Amino acid sequence: MRKLALSDEILLSIESPARYIGGEVNSVMKDPAEVDIRFAMCFPDVYEIGMSYMGIQILYDMFNRREDVWCERVYSPWTDLDKIMREQKIPLFALESQDPLKEFDFLGITLQYEMCYTNILQVLELGQIPLLASERTDEHPLVIGGGPCSYNPEPIADFFDLFYMGEGETVYDELFDLYKEYKKAGRSREEFLRRAASVPGIYVPSMYEPSYNEDGTLAAFTPRYSDVPAQVEKQVVMDLDHVTYPKAPVVPFIKATQDRVVLEIMRGCIRGCRFCQAGMIYRPTRQKDVESMKEYARAMLENTGYEEISLSSLSSSDYEQLPELVNYLIELCGEKKVNISLPSLRIDAFSLDVMGKVQDVKKSSLTFAPEAGSQRMRDVINKGLTEEVILEGAGKAFEGGWNKVKLYFMLGLPTETEEDIKGIAWLSQKIAERYYEIPKSERVGKCQITASTSFFVPKPFTPFQWASMNTEEEFLEKAKIVKQEVRAQINQKSIKYNYHEADVSVLEGLLARGDRRVAKTILEAYRNGALFDAWSETFKMDAWKKAIESAGTDLNFYVHRERSLDELFPWDFIKIGVTKDFLKREWENAKQGKVTPNCREKCSGCGAAKFGGGVCYEG
Amino acid sequence: MKVRVKFAKEGAMKFIGHLDIMRYFQKAVRRADIGAAFSEGFSPHMIMSFAAPLGVGITSSGEYFDMELTQSRSSEELVSRLNAQMAEGMRVLSVRKVPDGKASKAMSLVAAADYTVAFREGKEPRGCWQDRVDEFLSQDQILVWRKTKRSEGETDIRPWIYELKAVKDGLSMRLSAGSVHNLKPELVAEAFYKYVGEEPQPFAWQVHRGEIYADLGDENERKLVTLESLGENIE
């Protein structure tokens, strides 16, 4: 039997010991003596969150298909174990072998949200790996980042040896082969990194030098050597039908947040919402073949024993074979007694019919994401959802027996006025009114409308990357306006209003559009005790406030000011296919409230067509 | 057809709690594709009932659950299909057919269980504790402070200790179990430490459950039989 890294005494004195023991069904064991490369893949958050993320499962499966690589997993130890590991100087280990991370060749860290950045430092420190890439030697693993937040890697660039830009399926093989070659030849870490910088999609921060203007903006971002490319190209898989996808993902013993089979049906989104980073960085939209989806659904259910299956993509309603796939799943799941968890779908006759088949209407709720309260504001953000469509969808659903509606909005969007803010309450009220139009005898009690707002955070590679972000005070003031306006509605008793924390949003804004100098703030915040910042129970605003102060970080510069059109951004050296010119055009359109058609209606020439496939070449 | 599955839970699996073990077996049974029966409704669930929950940290070689099957297969095939789906540390020991009906439900049958409490090195009672087990057991009363959901107070656990003997590195015992008098082995071990004049250190022992029994006797005499023996092999 495997020997565990932690003693019984430790495991029995912490919460959920199953987080740290590995050995799950479908986890992969290999003989370390038989492989050339040991890779530890990390999701820097607690196990239950990390195990819900399909991206790691895809790479885990893909890497382990190689005989010369053993890929294992590691997650952030929760605060209880963190304390014990520090006290007893126990090195952080990978789940499968239970071997210390510091013995690995690579430590891969997926960057799914900014508020996990201090957790990266925790993993490194507990792993007994120097926090700064510049302090690591040939003895240490190469720390490589990837995932959506690596599209602005600069605030965490000091902590990483490399970043992988884009979809992992393309150049990891090349990188591994190169690593093996250099390792066998006994060449240094520095030599490997220098060479790796030329692999398409690989960004080696230490090979680049930023310089700044007097006003603090970036003046230039230049390679240190002539053989290092000035730009890094995002990697995309253009043949999604022949790319690997795990038929037997690892099944946790404890309940993960996503406790089900997750079937990825599409990458990218045709919609072009102007606040949405995923909608830009994953272009072009590519659909997976429906026949292979059916095969995968069956195989994954059989290999995992999961009781539930869900579909994963952005805007799933835009998957053209959705009706065919869903009807197949209904049949398959009926036979296998498996539940279907539907992604949020555009509310229409098809989705209501399907929802009625797979959910208990009385218990389930409808979800709309209008994102903004007024039509003017929705035009600014290019959210092609009209009030008419929402009311029609809600009306149909109410007639079908639903009485719960969830609405998602953002506050602090560019050009927002008080009318737009109050519009959130007004739209909620109109939906409630639509419910009470149904004759009393046909209604099932009161309706419950839950309106939630998050605060808008401008993200790199979106048309709003130039936008100013509100201050905490402005956010809270806006939330108050919504709250008061909701209370003023006739059907206020049927409307519930929630809003996200404002202080975390401002930090997210700092980390999202920061440059290399922000690393100091992150490090300081971590030293001040910041950890698990995405969790309200562990978030310590004071640790961050102190860090921002001592590092002399100007929030106005990074977060609140509107950027000028000719400013060079820290992330501009990354080429995502979508051009800066297109984003600029979209920023102008936004300010004028001009709607841009989606990719299927009309090509807007964003630049993603250069990848040679997907929606750009449909029909 | 109702079957009773006997399994062992060892190694790292001892850190998986009871609810997660139930979820684990629901998935394992699905993967084994042995035709489990399901409830009706929007979220059908497998008809499965566990005999007695096992605490986190305790290993066992005698755990049970009952389940309903819609297909017929031999015991041998069921065992091998299930074992093909087990994680390291879990092992299916037998699958036997048991009578239908509430009265024969594993959970309601539980009357006693065997345990060994193995003292961890350096944490065992000092001196020749082995020699004092018999005199400990020969007391008329063994009073312990016990906290249950309903009450707290001193109770006599002696009647619920059916057997107790010293083994190489600890105590082996047969205790009353189930819904009426469920005596935890840790309580007996603690009482023994106190009897020999010591206070057990934290994590002083590793508990292992060896077997679970039903009582086929009457008020006058117990007749303990293993839950497994109440089922019959399927040819």
Image: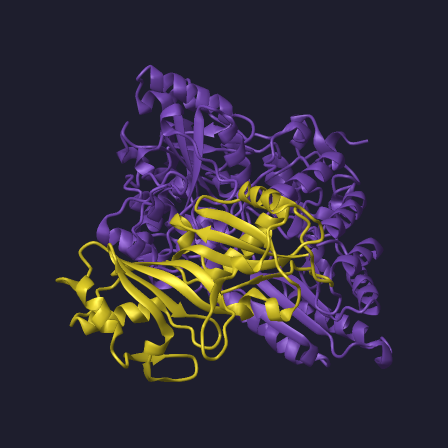
Chain colours: A purple, B yellow
Q: Residue furthest left?
A: B127
| Residue A282 placement: quadrant | top right
Vertical relation: A91 (above or below) A70: below
Compare residues A31 and B147 and report the one nearer the observer.
B147
Exactly how many numbered labels are in the figure?
0
Looking at the image, can residue B25 be seen?
A: yes
Residue drawn at (64%, 53%) of the image = A307
Compare residues B198 and A196 and report the one nearer the observer.
B198
Residue A94 in percent (x, y) is at 38, 41
Residue drawn at (45%, 75%) of the image = B221
Quadrant location of the N terminus of chain A in the rendered image: top left
Compare residues A333 and B119 and report the one nearer the observer.
B119
Residue A260 in percent (x, y) is at 60, 50
Vertical relation: A282 (above or below) A530: above
Residue A149 in percent (x, y) is at 49, 43
Please indicate whether residue A51 sits to the left or right of residue A332 in the image.
left
Residue A456 in percent (x, y) is at 56, 57
Q: Residue furthest front?
A: B220
Looking at the image, can residue A341 be seen?
A: no
Vertical relation: A339 (above or below) B183: above
Quadrant location of the C terminus of chain A in the rendered image: top right
Compare residues A548 and B59 and report the one nearer the observer.
B59
Please indicate whether residue A398 sits to the left or right of residue B212 in the image.
right
| Residue B150 placement: quadrant | bottom left
Residue drawn at (66%, 27%) of the image = A242
